[in-house]
Amino acid sequence: MEPNTSDSAQHSESKIRNGEALIKLEGIIKVFFTDEVETHALSGIHLEIKRGEYVSIAGPSGCGKSTMLSILGLLDTPTEGTYILNGNSVANIGMAERARIRNREVGFIFQSFNLIGDLTVYENVELPLTYRGMDSAERKQRVHEALEKVGMGHRVKHFPSQLSGGQQQRVAVARALGGKPSILLADEPTGNLDSKNGEAVMELLRELHREGATICMVTHDPRFARYAERTVHLFDGRIVEESVEASNQ
């Protein structure tokens, strides 16, 4: 019998997407210099993330997870090595171009939500789109689509202080989704949430991945690392192991 469901079509489309390398890190080294000390945060990182993949970066505190995510998100630059995003090296681009790429290609989800307290839910999600110079009609459509996707469409006029931690993180996810980025970067997205809200946010990310999102998540919690298809284990700035979840094979 021929498959005729939308799920089958999405699965086939996902397989096509997964053949493309969205991110390639080749020999990435990051050294922080102070007056007396050199700290090697990353030492020879080689990593490829394919389009449509869900990867977690796991390891103990201080192993280099957040440094790697900062480099992936163009918030920091490596001391040595090559970073290729969407087929283009980012080595020699200026600050303005970096900002433009961050705004259009990368969606950030932070542990601390980073919502602006005196803006409404709607305005928080709309703000990055305003920076693009997007017209108001398209902004409105993008904001409502993103908020509906995370189950927060009924809270558009609320302020962050009127929301629970889990709701604030959902709004932060919507803000990241609004720009339709190539990749979502999540830095300990459950770090400030209780276990119930943490599980709910992880289920939301899993659903977004099923819909085609490429996700790279930093976590120190093995319970949440298992939501990803593949986990990259860091220790002392090096990749020491990679594992694939059996349920995702």
Image (cartoon, helix red, strand yellow):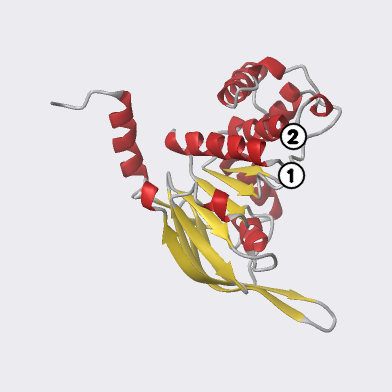
Report the residue marked by disc 2.
165
| Percent coordinates x, y for residue 44 in the rendering | 54, 75
Residue closest to the eye, 178 or 227: 227
Q: Amino acid at mark 1?
A: Asn
N-term mark: 2 or 1: 2
Which SS class for mark 2? helix
Report if the CB atoms under discs 2 and 1 are less than 8 Å apart: yes
| Percent coordinates x, y for residue 90 in the rendering | 57, 58
Q: Amino acid at mark 2?
A: Gly
Viewer can see residue 93: no
Which SS class for mark 1? loop
For residue 221, above or below residue 7: below
| Count of numbered tags | 2
Residue at 63% from the left image edge and 46% from the top image edge: 102
| Percent coordinates x, y for residue 122 in the rendering | 72, 22
| Percent coordinates x, y for residue 82 in the rendering | 53, 67
Residue closest to the eye, 68 or 59: 59
| Quadrant of the image occupied by residue 123 | top right
Report the residue marked by disc 1.
192
Q: Is residue 157 left or right of residue 204?
A: right
**Disc 1 packing (10 Å; few <14; some 14–19; many ≥20):** some
Quarter of the figure with the N terminus: top left
Residue at 56% from the left image edge and 25% from the top image edge: 149
Residue closest to the eye, 64 or 25: 64
**Disc 2 packing (10 Å; few <14; some 14–19; many ≥20):** some
